[in-house]
Image (cartoon, helix red, strand yellow):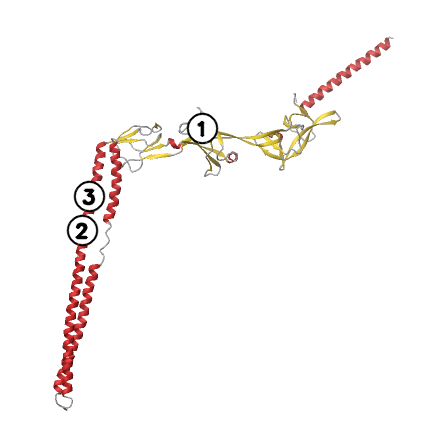
Amino acid sequence: MKQKGQKAAFWLKGFVWLLVVMFLFTVASRAADTFTVAKVSVVSPLARKLQYRVSAEGRIEKNREISILTCPDLLVKSIQVNEGQRVKKGEVLAKLDKSSLKEQIAKIQDEKRTLELENAASEANKRQEQKKRQQEIFRARKDYEELKKKNEKALARAKKELDKAKEKLRKVKKEKKNETGKGEDLVKELQALAEEKRKAYQERKESGKAEEKAANRAIEDAMTDVPADNSAAIHQITIKNLNKELQKLQTVQKQNGKILAPKDGVITGIFVNVGQRTPDSGIFNMTDDSAGLKFVGQLTLEDAKYVSTGDLVTLHTTEREEEVSVTSLEIDESQEFMKITALLPAKSFSLGETALLQIVQESESYPCTVPATAVYQDNNKAYVYLVQKEDTILGKQEVARKMEIKVLEKNGTYAALDPDVLDSESRIVAESDRFVESGDRVRLKEGE
């Protein structure tokens, strides 16, 4: 009986040790799993729209700047504004010295009067010259007509004398025809006389033509156009410009020498000092509130893909935020950034402020999206790891299986996948505490 009790105690003791060993192995096995089996977080595909958040830093700038001009060479007495100061239309920007204004007006009036007198004298001289030319033409024509008549008479006389000498010679020849050897001397004398009259007639005819030709040339010379004189027309243009300057000066004089703001806006430049004379260029630059302000910033070319002209964006400054629309997108000279511009209401922001532009764009709705961390790339192929329960020598275990998929669209947070190979029940590894390969056992994080 004692021996049976000892035997039972032995087996009981051995069973206890077996249980202890099994417990230790279980603890060791679990401890080993903690170090060798990846702990993963899983997700199931969900329907969602992908969002793209784009931001760009920039500054508030003037949309349009105008230059304020005044008449040149006027003495600046005082300047009433500072650069960066906001002014209203009609506000006094500067005052000019009244005496220098009067001197300038008097100087232009004298220049104008001088040119007007020169034009009047030129016109009088022109009329006198015209009258003189008309008289010369009249006299030349009269001389030509008188010369022509005189030559016609002289030529007629010479012709008459020639005809008379020829007739006399003819009669003598007829009378002496039958008288041989008699009257030959008289015939020769009459022939010589006729030849002399013929020569006199021919000379008179040729000299008359030469005289008439010379007289006709005198008419042509008298009718020759006088050299063009555009001085009066040029003076008139100068007078017209002087009148414009005079009108500007008189306008400033009516304003008591004050330079006034033509628009509501901000002074952005002052180009003259007290005691200096006004230049030909502008003396002030200022923004035009009616044209508003604009935000100008830079986007990376990657971010610029998600922004289009006309998109609504949110503009943030330290004091306020406002929704505005994108006016333009232009690639900069470096070809590395895109310049983004948005027009702003005139008084919504302050000129020179730093601002942050933000825009959120959404894609179409995709039925199958997963976190971007769940998608892997290898040799231009995309894949995910599915967690599946499988029978192993250790019983039912969670195993990771590689599944090739097609990425339709992706942002920095989520990826839209082709839903043909996945469904809403699929469990996809989103995060893992260590590297996982297809076929590896995995453990789900607590609560999953």
Q: Which residue is mark 3?
A: 114
Q: Amino acid at mark 1?
A: Ala
Q: Amino acid at mark 3?
A: Thr
In x, y percent, where is residue 12? Answer: 80, 13
- CB contact under 8 Å: marks 3 and 2: no
Q: Is tag 3's residue or tag 2's residue first in the polypeptide sequence?
A: 3
On screen, 163 above or below 228?
below
Query: Which is more toward the observer, 391 or 212?
Result: 212
Q: Which residue is mark 1?
A: 355
Helix or strand or loop: what does disc 1 sit on?
strand
Q: Amino acid at mark 2?
A: Asn
Which residue is rendered at x = 60% and y = 35% of the image?
A: 408
Residue 324 left/right relative to 275: right
Residue 245 left/right relative to 144: right
Q: Nearer the viewer, mark 3 or mark 2?
A: 2
On screen, 263 above or below 178?
above
* Rendering quarter of residue 421: top right
Q: Nearer the viewer, mark 1 or mark 3?
A: 3
Helix or strand or loop: what does disc 3 sit on?
helix
In x, y percent, where is residue 120? Answer: 19, 47
In x, y percent, where is residue 86? Answer: 35, 27
